[in-house]
Image (cartoon, rainbow, N blue to C red):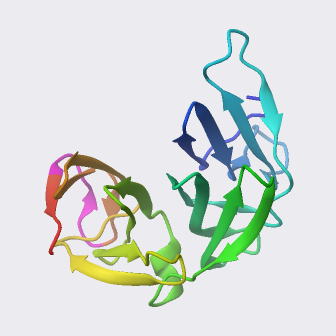
Amino acid sequence: MPSPRSSFDAAVIGNTLYVVGGWSMQGDQKTKWHDTAYAIDLAQPKLTWTELSKPGFERRALSVGGFHGKLYVVGGMQSNDKVTRKTAVYDPAHKRWSDGPKLPGDDTEGFGAACFPLGEHLFVSTASGKLLRLAADGSAWKVVNDFEHGRFFHRMLPIDDMHFGLIGGANMQRGRYANVELLELKR
């Protein structure tokens, strides 16, 4: 990558990998919050990172998902040490950022969430144990399921058209997770 970073997230749209946010902690140097996003076309024989237009925010502990040709950047910790529930949307066809809907609930919902598409929907799982689905028109997030134990800094991957696997992460009351939890979608 063009610069070292941690606590970022990444998603693939088509053949392109997108990386957004994060920060860099290099020993005794001052922590650097990244206000950049990059793309790399994995179909090219020579891989080259391209910087996207500036997203207009600095966030880490965010979640990123590719859906219907757009990149959704959900929540995260901001450089002012506050958590946000905001969603930013990057449209690669027009090379521009726009505001998406906020996650419902309190600001902690945006910390260390996981985001992934399944079927014709984009989903986010939050630290409080909520599964949210983006409305078809992209205007709002709706709670569609609850799971037993909320997680942050986890991964959510599709198992089939009705199930996600929740992998890793942590919970403030329970500590770190070593198990995979099966999350069934409600119709």
Residue lying at 63% horizontally and 68% vertically, measured from the top left: 77
Please state the horizontal and vertical placement of residue 104, each as a whole percent of the image.
46, 88
In terms of image quadrants, where is residue 14? Answer: top right
In the image, farthest residue toward the bottom:
105
Residue lying at 23% horizontally and 66% vertically, measured from the top left: 174
Residue lying at 61% horizontally and 19% vertically, measured from the top left: 43
> Does 95 sit above or below residue 123?
above
Q: Which residues are magenta?
A: 173-180
In depth, the one of 65 and 177 nearer the eye is 65
Assess whether residue 178 is covered by the magenta stretch. yes
> Does 61 sit above or below residue 126?
above
In depth, the one of 81 and 37 nearer the eye is 37
Q: Quadrant of the C terminus?
A: bottom left
For the question of whether residue 2 can be seen, the reply is no
Per the picture, the main secondary structure of the magenta-coloured stretch is loop
Please state the horizontal and vertical placement of residue 86, each as a whole percent of the image.
62, 78
Assess whether residue 150 is covered by the magenta stretch. no
Q: Quadrant of the N terminus?
A: top right
Please state the horizontal and vertical placement of residue 153, each as a whole percent of the image.
42, 56
Seen in the image, is 120 located left or right of residue 77? left
Question: Could you tell me how many numbered marks the image carries?
Answer: 0
Seen in the image, is 146 located left or right of residue 40? left
Seen in the image, is 96 located left or right of residue 130? right
Please state the horizontal and vertical placement of residue 105, each as a whole percent of the image.
44, 90
In terms of image quadrants, where is residue 100? Answer: bottom right
In terms of image quadrants, where is residue 29? Answer: top right
> Does 133 sit above or below residue 22?
below
For the question of whether residue 169 can be seen, the reply is yes
